[in-house]
Image (cartoon, rainbow, N blue to C red):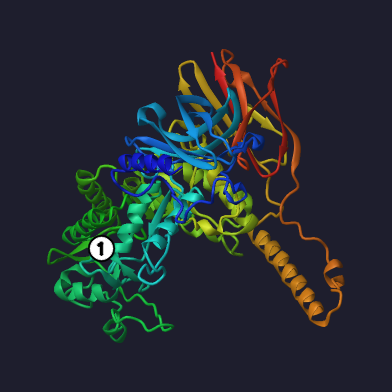
Amino acid sequence: MNGVTTRWVLAVCLLAGGGAALAQAPTTAPPPASDISKERIGFGVTNTPASGIYLVRVWPEKLLFFRPEKIAGMVELVNVGAEKREVVIQAHVTRGLDQTAGVRSKAVELAADSRAQVVFEWPAKEVGLFGHAMVAEISLGGKVIARGEEFFGVSDAVWDIAISGNHPMGSTADQVKDMAGIAAAVDGFRAKYVNTFEKFFWAPDDFGEMTPSEESWYSGQARYHERADRIRRMCDRGWEVGVLPTTYGKSIGSGSYARDLIRRRPELIHGYGSVMNFQADTEELARWQVVDEPGKIWQSCNWAFYNMNDPDVVQHGIDELIGSMKQFGWAAVRFDGHFTARSGKVRVKGEVTEFTAERADAQSAANHKALKDQMGQVNPAFGFGDNYVDCDLAGRWQNNLRDAIELCRGGGHVMDEYAQAIEGGNHPLRRWEDFALQMVKHAEQIRRMGGHYFVICHRSGILERYHTIGVLAAGAHPDNVVPWSIDHPYHRFATRYSEILWHPDLRYVWNPYGLVVVRAGVWWENYVREQVIDATHRRLIVHLVNPPAQETATETAEAMREVKRREDRRREIASQAAAKKEAPDFAELDALLPVKVAPDARADIAVRVVPDALGKEWRVARALLLDPETATHAEIRVDVGDPYFWELRVPKLEFWAVIVLELER
């Protein structure tokens, strides 16, 4: 067994350029092969226990491969029997919906009570872009005894198939004991199919000082205690496992480093020559970098508003970001307020000048373009994003059109933070139908301009589930995901079927009645898309959503709170009864009307497609039903016997399903 494992580790070093072990290698020794009960069998793996051979997992080296890097993955087996066995592993990649590519076979000899980890490789061009499955079948004596698969994505741009995460941790100097803790935090993102993370509030100053020379400091925003070596390890681990590391950025500074920068270069700040725009608390700033005593951690900001109207000031921020990318290995930046110029009287290069709204918009666009152009000369694959929408993209188009277009161009990440709060009683999108429609509108508007719409979703229960469905079905991306709070399976589905969600050739079909008809009560009208594959092949894609049980997200949140209140009360009654050694009396709870949190599943849903609306030369090649709950798909029958329409029937709709109708001529 040791010989097999050693050969695998050597193969891994060749693949990773001498780096860490392939994928998420366990930090502790695996259990003995004979103790199969302690193995963590991979998701979706099937075995034949009587054979004595178990497939433990199929594991791509990375969650997201960045083309043109080689695709690699590992198949892990154990032999729990008392005899030597020889098995054949056949591995391949399933790309697209079900195209088999890159079939590989290896014979492996397994000693009694042993373990083997076998690496397979594919060139990037053999696999292609978007989501895939690495599949392995294990044969013994010519008979398949085990099968498993795991999903991964391939992209040549940071945001194209991104599921964007929160940060693995703040205060890297304090929150973990060692580098293993840093790696484990990043691995948690990979385990939940979150393929980027954003380290925020880490820099000494989010604009003015992103290339720290010290090994430890307190950050400008929120005063996180950070260490350079641990941030570098966080980024390195992200690249190792395919969770791309992105940095927070800003046009506003804060903290003691902002104070020191302004002292050295006062012309950087708005108000230079009169009242500087620096919200300074001198007492806080004096002790900003003093290490906190245990239990006496404090946080603050002290905002410094840098002059984004002056190209020389903007250049300082560009230089810092490029230097930070080189220092830490960032794949992208996500601004929480980018290099936006102001309107009004502003000092530029020593002269006070008037900026109209139009001139300020043009300067903002020029600032962002300068950043993209200069970064592109150093790292052409670097990605850019900004917190920009606030549930009102139309207002941005009206007031800052040049800036909005520049943010979208080239695959920009355009973020909506306010959308996460739709349960608020005054939120403009609190009605679920309004939310669903606005997600589609924004996603399409941003896609037209070459960008990607990213939405921060709620982080618990049925509210999170429907929030995420509304985002993904619209063709948008989840943002600021916290892996340990995920309460749905849809990121796994989006990893595998990213082509159906985010392919640039997808086209929305507005007002699809007359092309598609689905019975009332199911959401589908905003979720019809067409995709032209080539001159003789196309797809019609229809998302079906079983609407929430409540009209508004506010009511959904209240239902969740009421369920929790009753659960807490039930535990309290049980605890009090146990203390008295009595049987608990739940009569007060049993008398309450039940709370309906999730909708009832719908059955036997007819979906009708009118071929006249497509052009009579098109015929059905096949239809697939995709299940986001299990990240699987199956062919379904299409009845083409009626002279007026084709009909498909979906047997059950619990929350969300996707129909893919493949057409040919």
Which residue occupies the foreground of this view, 17 or 499? Answer: 17
Q: Nearer the viewer, residue 347 or 664?
A: 664
Q: Amino acid at mark 1?
A: Met
Provide the residue designation for mark 1. 210
Q: Image quadrant of residue 267?
A: bottom left
- Quarter of the picture containing the C terminus is top right
> Is residue 382 positioned above or below 188 on the image?
above
Which image quadrant for residue 218? bottom left
Position of residue 650 relative to residue 170, above or below, is above
**Residue 69 position (above or below residue 486):** above
Do we see residue 400 in this rendering?
A: no
Side of 203 where 577 appears, left or right: right
- Is 437 left, or right, of 247 in this rendering? right
Q: Is residue 73 visible?
A: yes
How far from the left and from the top, in percent, is residue 580?
A: 82, 82
Query: Which type of secondary structure does the marked residue at label 1 adopt?
Result: loop
Crowd band around label 1 with a 10 angstrom C-alpha radius: few (<14), some (14–19), many (20+): many
Residue 355, image x and y in percent?
24, 60
Total numbered circles: 1
Q: Residue at x 58, y 52 (%)?
A: 467
The percent position of residue 474, horizontal first and vertical second, equals 53, 42
Q: Nearer the viewer, residue 59 or 437?
A: 59
